[in-house]
Amino acid sequence: MEMGFPVIDMEKLNGEERDAAMERINDACENWGFFELVNHGVSHELMDRVERLTKEHYRKCMEQRFKEMVASRGLDAVDCEINDTDWESTFFLRHLPNSNMSEIPDLDEDYRTAMKEFAAELEKLAELVLDLLCQNLGLEKGYLKRAFYGSNGPNFGTKVSNYPPCPKPDLIKGLRAHTDAGGLILLFQDHKVSGLQLLKDGKWVDVPPMHHSIVINLGDQLEVITNGKYKSVMHRVIAQADGNRMSIASFYNPGNDAIIYPAPALVEGEEEKSKLYPKFVFDDYMKLYMGLKFQAKEPRFEAMKAMESSISNHSLGPIATV
């Protein structure tokens, strides 16, 4: 296996190099839990506009609030490691099934417009990537989208974060280590200020900043649906002494009432023991995750197994046909 961080040129999916690109994606999903997309079809002009407006919004609306929070908690003068706070300034935009964009009071109209346009592009890209995963897994096209659908469609939202310069980067994490609870994560990260790392083979590996790339990582729900063939991986953000790192992470997640379970086609044979993961309602998993985000994922899966009998009467088929 090539040891360099997996970068996928999506233009190669349209020609004679498609098979090699698909294998690269499969290898990344099996061995990294992350990969980086270039030539992904999202306009560079749009990405530049979103980046400019995000950084302007931070300076105008959030920087002073962050400084006040740091001062009130004495975070700029800590002398021991901090394990209950992240060095980040963040807000969340919800796109699907219902948008909250109009409810966020300090977004300029041009920023709101750009984020709506960006979200629409990322939603399309997410569904394309899910179908690429279906092909690699031997699942029918659209299976993962249907599995995520629930009764009202997927949850899709964007966490907009800034990681300002930190005076104690050895003592405070930008974002503590965790796996993502949901489905597919699409990250537009700062190409000048690094900080994102993933845990691979017991070592922390940098996710390289690349201009106009979209970083993909797999959440816990894809690990369950693939019965462990693909896995979510621990990742973190290291605070930096210099530079303000921008992070725009969009989460394409199952709907609240979507029932998540290993795809029958990926469970070998008929024996129950070959099914490694439980069946559960996504919202139940999220309620558990909220209190255990920065802990190992395995106990979360075990807790879901204990709840499995409560939904045993639900059909195994994806709820919606879309």
Image (spheres, grey):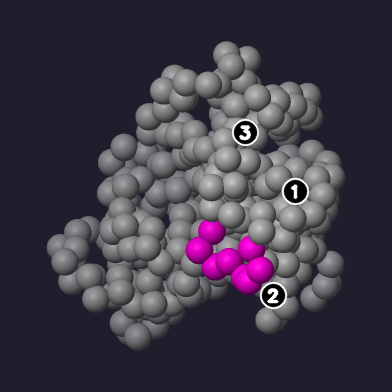
Q: Where does residue 109 sit, x and y in percent of width and height? A: 57, 14
- Quadrant (top left, top right, bottom left, bottom right) of the N terminus: bottom right
Q: Which badge, 2 or 1, is on the more N-terminal residue?
A: 1
Q: Which badge, 3 or 1, is on the more N-terminal residue?
A: 3
Would you say the magenta stretch is mainly helix, strand or loop? loop
CA distance separating discs 3 and 1: 13 Å
Mark 2, mark 1: which one is toward the viewer?
Answer: 1
CA distance separating discs 2 and 3: 36 Å
Residue 82: within the magenta? yes
Residue drawn at 57 percent across, 31 percent down: 119
Residues in magenta, as a range:
78-85
Determine whether, in the image, residue 131 is placed left or right of residue 25.
Answer: left
Q: Where does residue 279 sit, x and y in percent of width and height? A: 30, 67
Residue 153: within the magenta? no
**How many neighbours does mark 1 have within 10 angstroms: few (below 14), some (14-19), or many (20 or more)?**
some
What's the residue type where badge 3 is placed? Gln
Residue drawn at 54 percent across, 68 percent down: 83
Pointer 1 residue = 165
Residue drawn at 54 percent across, 47 percent down: 72
Q: Dividing the picture into quarters, in which one does residue 110 lie?
A: top right
**How many neighbours does mark 3 have within 10 angstroms: few (below 14), some (14-19), or many (20 or more)?**
few
Q: Nearer the viewer, residue 199 or 152?
A: 199
What's the residue type where badge 2 is placed? Lys
Camera sees residue 202: yes
Pointer 3 residue = 64
Q: Where does residue 145 sit, x and y in percent of width and height? A: 45, 47
Q: Which badge, 2 or 3, is on the more N-terminal residue?
A: 3
Q: Which mark is residue 200?
A: 2
**How many neighbours does mark 2 have within 10 angstroms: few (below 14), some (14-19), or many (20 or more)?**
some
Mark 2, mark 3: which one is toward the viewer?
Answer: 3
Label 2 sits on a secondary structure element that is strand
